[in-house]
Amino acid sequence: MVRHAGRHASLRHDTGGGRGQRGWGAVRRGRRAVGGPADVRDRGGRVTAARSRGAGLTFGLALDLGAPGRSLRQVADGLQPIVDLAERRRFASLWVGEIYAPTPGAWAAPSSLAMLSWLAARTTTIGLGTGVLLVPAWHPLRLAYEAAVVDQLSAGRLTLGVGLGSRELWRRFGRDGVPGALMDATLNAVRALWTGSDGHHHDGLDIDGPVHPRPCQAGGPPILVGGLAPAAARRAARFDGWYAATNHHFGSQLRPAARRYLDALETTDPSKPPKIVVNRMAFAADTTKAALADGLPYVTALLEKYAALGGLVDEDGNPAKPTRDVLARMADSLCLIGSPERISEQLAEYRQAGVTHVNLRVSFGGMPVELTGRTVNLIADSVMGQGSSGTADPPGPAAAAGPVAAARTGRTGERSPDTLEKEPPCQKQ
């Protein structure tokens, strides 16, 4: 078993070896899902952090959209083969984050929902998620409208991952007040506006509603909440799950935060299946030695960007010095890197921590699309264990009725009139 306390040296050796709740990942129509929010409970029915090695995971791809010297359109078009591959290999979802950096060179675009609208037009069945949307950049009414539109355009495939952002970001967008309280107010308002109420007149907000069109999914897309603080765990339990970021160390940050969320969920609603979504940089090769040789330069390039933005700490919570040696030593607690056997060992510990879904960040650091594709295929074949088949059916109304019979007429996302007629309608407006 991989040891996450003092784990750094362990990378150097290759072992060789119904959507009843909103969201994705349930076992549908007798098909075996690779993962999903499988119940994690003790004999009294309470949620617990323990997961057996046999408990499954769902997998998505988290796409990086920044590259020096290239336009956003060039980067997005360059990722089209990976988008096509993800849907062909039946990954559960595609995710994009957002960043509002005042300087160039970031890894994400300023609007995750705009990028998901672009992806919705180029895909057919795969889930779409924000990983994460930064709440201070969004007025609650605007967020409710924009997310509803994306959910409509994607036929109910949206999951909304949200993050608190920095105090500086709240200041830049002119949002005065306590960030945590403002985030609660925003999410409460968005959910109320989605559900057809007269609006939201609480939490210091006075917003008339509802919004039209309403989301495709009844009640709106699932909301996954990021953050390491105890308040974030309670917030995630009130909504639809917890989202762990790329720069959260497994042993010192992710695992205890997952425990806090599971404890909060037990208090808030013990009957609700837990959902823990994790972003991890992923790089696979036939051997761990080859993966380290090929992948560490891209890992350190991305971690250097996090350090430059003040978003990287070591496992003790201290600001990390962005030297190559330090960043390379941090890779084991922040990445899934190695042979498929090695990555499977790492994922076993994530399952034991309560993780239900892993977003593989596979296009970071200016990585060539060929290396990204190699990682996707190796993980699909050998880690997910699906050969040329895939994971679970996609989320949303389409999933509730079984797989959409997408008659391809060309590039991914194009559908014939016959296919469109088979898709279940969104909720009535």
Image (tube, rainbow, N blue to C red):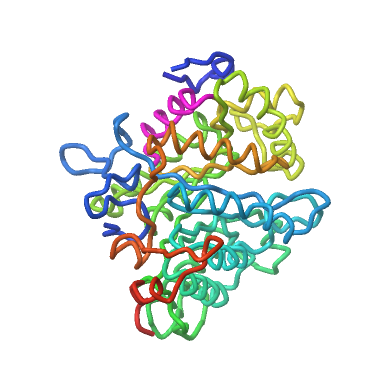
Where the N terminus falls, by quadrant? top left
In the picture, measured across the screen, residue 352 lies left or right of residue 71, that is left
Q: Is residue 322 above or below residue 288?
A: below
Image coordinates of residue 91 in percent, x first then y, are 45, 48
In the picture, measured across the screen, residue 313 lies left or right of residue 342, that is right
Image coordinates of residue 106 in percent, x first then y, are 74, 50
* Count of picture labels: 0
Image coordinates of residue 49 in percent, x first then y, are 33, 36
Q: Is residue 51 above or below residue 233?
A: above
Instruction: Please give the name of the residue rendered at 53% of the width and 77% of the height, measured from the top-left corner.
Output: 145
Q: Is residue 114 above or below residue 293?
A: below
Instruction: Please give the name of the residue rendered at 27% of the width and 50% of the height, measured from the top-left corner.
Output: 27
In the picture, measured across the screen, residue 333 lies left or right of residue 174, that is left
Q: Which residues are magenta?
A: 339-355
- Residue closest to the eye, 308 or 158: 158
- Residue closest to the eye, 128 or 317: 128
- Residue closest to the eye, 112 or 199: 112
